[in-house]
């Protein structure tokens, strides 16, 4: 009888201890979550005028976008921020003229494939012709199809290499377009060069600040009958902050 009493007492004491422990645990404050919170980086602030770096295997080109053509500027920035141009090709190159790229169909395109029609399903950019922005050597301009409004391709662009011209040449271009060149424009076309016959037909929305020699290097690579380089010339574009 005494043995059973001791056993009952032991069980009672154990139950009492467990109850006390559980009550004490319930009274403890909840532990704070000490895990480090992930703070997302804020979008970086753009610095105007916006400059961008075009990287290629042939060298780097730094371009400056014009604030006088905000529709083209903002569209280009949006595409660059989305990584649209990464690994696209300069798919058309012509010595003493220009190098063109930005066709989305050029990414991973098979050798010899005809390129230049990509981006047609996207919304065109209305033309922004600014007299102070002309096709001098190093100009950044938007390609386009033959639409009568001269609206620009939403993604394809070209960089001008061009060549030098004489006063007689420029007089002829003036007659054709019905607008005179300024003294500064004439001097630029006669000394630095460019493609004056494209003025008023294609929107210029920026210029090269460094790497004009890279344009010349790319424009002179071996190419096929469609002016596509025989070896792919890939680009990557990022904003310089």
Image: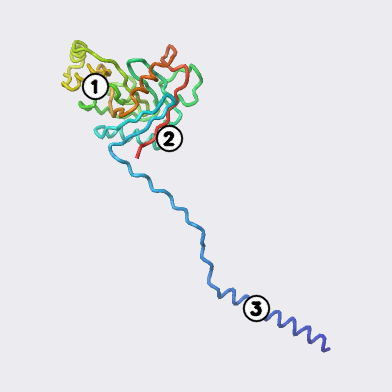
User: Going 39% across and 16% down the picture, which residue do you hit?
Assistant: 220
Q: Which residue is mark 3?
A: 19
Q: Which residue is mark 1?
A: 200
The colour scheme of the drawn protein is rainbow
Depth check, mark 1 against mark 2: the one in front is 2
Q: Is residue 136 above or below residue 72?
A: above
User: x, y percentage for residue 237?
Assistant: 40, 32
Question: Which quadrant of the rendered structure holds the N terminus?
Answer: bottom right
Q: Residues within 10 Å of mark 2 (few under 14, many from 20)?
A: few
Q: Residues within 10 Å of mark 3 (few under 14, many from 20)?
A: few
User: x, y percentage for residue 125?
Assistant: 31, 29
Residue 95 sits in which quadrant? top left
Depth check, mark 3 against mark 2: the one in front is 2
Of marks 1 and 2, which one's residue comes earlier in the chain? 2
SS under mark 1? loop
User: x, y percentage for residue 218?
Assistant: 39, 20
Closest to the observer: 31 or 186? 186
Closest to the observer: 175 or 125? 175
């Amino acid at each position: 009888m005494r043995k059973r009493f001791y056993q009952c007492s032991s069980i009672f004491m154990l139950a009492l201890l467990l109850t006390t422990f559980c009550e004490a645990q319930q009274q403890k404050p909840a532990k704070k979550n000490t895990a480090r919170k992930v703070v997302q980086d804020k979008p970086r602030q753009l610095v105007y005028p916006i400059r961008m770096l075009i990287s290629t295997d042939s060298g780097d080109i730094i371009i400056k976008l014009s604030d006088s053509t905000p529709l083209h500027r903002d569209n280009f920035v949006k595409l660059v921020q989305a990584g649209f141009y990464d690994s696209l090709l300069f798919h058309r190159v012509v010595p003493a003229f220009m190098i063109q790229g930005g066709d989305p169909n050029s990414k991973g395109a098979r050798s010899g494939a005809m390129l230049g029609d990509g981006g047609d399903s996207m919304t065109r950019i209305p033309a922004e012709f600014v007299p102070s922005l002309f096709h001098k050597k190093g100009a950044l301009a938007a390609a386009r199809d033959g639409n009568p409004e001269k609206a620009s391709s939403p993604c394809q662009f070209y960089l001008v290499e061009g060549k030098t011209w004489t006063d007689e040449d420029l007089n002829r271009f003036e007659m054709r377009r019905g607008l005179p060149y300024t003294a500064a424009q004439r001097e630029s076309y006669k000394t630095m060069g460019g493609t004056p016959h494209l003025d008023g037909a294609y929107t210029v929305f920026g210029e090269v600040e460094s790497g004009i020699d890279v344009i010349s290097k790319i424009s002179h690579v071996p190419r096929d009958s469609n002016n596509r380089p025989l070896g792919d010339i890939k680009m990557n574009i990022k904003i310089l902050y």
